[in-house]
Amino acid sequence: MRRVPFLDLTRQDRELEEELRGDLEDFLRRGRHVLGEEVLAFEEEFSRYCGMAHGVGVASGTDALLLSLRALGAGAGDEVIVPALTAPPTAVAVSLCGARPVFADVDPGTLTIDPASVEERLTPRTRFLIPVHLYGRMADMPGLRELASRRGLVVVEDCAQAHGASLEGRMAGSWGAAGCFSFYPTKNLGAYGDGGLVVTGDPSLARRLRMLRDYGRRDRDTLQEVGLNSRLDELQAAFLRTKLRRLEEWNRRRRELARRYLEGLRDLPLGLPPWTGGDEHCFHLFVVLCREREGLREHLARAGVETAVHYPLPLHLQPPFREGSSRPCPAAERAAREVLSLPLYPYLTDDEQDAVIAAVRSFYQAHRGRS
Ligand SMILES: *Cc1c(COP(=O)(O)O)cnc(C)c1O
């Protein structure tokens, strides 16, 4: 039996090994470990890739969100609207800055935040909106931007799953006041440990972020305000520069694999991700909706296919958040019961993917036989 891992990062490491060794040797020779030339160069290269003037490297995607919110003035008494279906850090960052996350429902088709639900959650205290480009799919940014400008909300994009996605020719990260990225190892652009970055077009916001990530220092000896220690380190930046040169090629392969899944699974009673075939999706994850999810998961596991669930519990039902006056989010709750992530990453082979498709198909064949 062929085992298909959900994700195998050693394959890309093997391909990049020589370049990464070169990066490590350069790093050891230079003797500069924090906030040096590699971080500056990566900030410049990544923000240019996103079409933005400024990039500020930080320690994680969570910190990218937290520091952006703080730099934009979010704090106690503010409400920040986030989707109910996302990774926990989207809402954790809001709570850490002292504001209150308010959970909006998602669109049942795209599973990204639903502008109509955002509108229903608005109160006089609502100041920020954090759309998440979930699974690599751009949220409805034109609709959300229109709403935000009409209602005076500041938009902070959670781009942790969307490196390289774009909509109407505008990259993820370039639609709001700040675009927040994570380089957690499993992301489309991953470091060898934690890392994050904020892109922005606003030079004064970039300046404030540079202080906030470095204790709040204005210069070596002067503290301007109270910040964090949240710096991207030189070695991660060097590795990320090497990997950034591959990102477009990797995302192309992700889209090719997505196309093959959509073709191979299209006649099955599964909810497949809607997609025009364009760059609005960079397929961080390939997520299907399945009413018999647990049965399908077990069937795939027996066939050697590893799967995952992103996410089994919507955030408004998570212990730290459910005590608030959260309203129901039926589409997110239903999605949480039905979502199943199939293996998809640039180094998945066609043969492996064919084995996944065959295993999914055999589940439905057996099912039909039984009923
Ligand atoms: C990964 C992720 C984050 C947080 O990134 P870290 O680098 O792990 O802190 C935030 N939001 C979403 C949607 C994510 O997937």
Image (tube, helix red, strand yellow):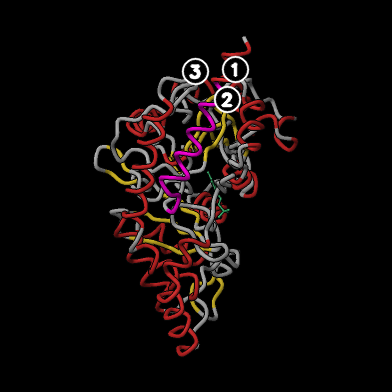
Dot 1 corresponds to which residue? 367
**Which residue was labeled with disc 2?**
363
In this rendering, the count of numbered labels is 3
Q: Nearer the viewer, residue 240 or 177?
A: 240
- What type is the residue that disc 1 sits on? His
Q: Are marks 2 and 1 in contact (CB under 8 Å)?
A: yes
* For discs 3 and 2, the disc positioned in front in the rendered view: 2
Location of the C terminus (image quadrant): top right
The magenta region covers: 347-364
Q: Identify the residue at horizontal 46%, vertical 79% (top origin).
A: 21
Residue 273 lies left or right of residue 330; in this view the side is: left
Image coordinates of residue 175 in percent, x first then y, are 34, 43
Residue 59: give x, y in percent of width and height.
55, 63
Residue 263 found in image quarter: top left
Q: Marks 2 and 1, Cα distance to the nearest angstrom?
A: 6 Å
Q: Is residue 131 above or below residue 51?
A: above
- Predominant SS of the magenta segment: helix
- CA gap, disc 3 to disc 1? 11 Å
In the picture of the structure, the residue carrying the numbered disc 3 is 269
Question: Which callout, 3 or 2, points at the residue further toward the start of the chain?
Answer: 3
Residue 303's spot in the image, x, y percent? 61, 37
Residue shown at 54%/51% (left/top)?
A: 7
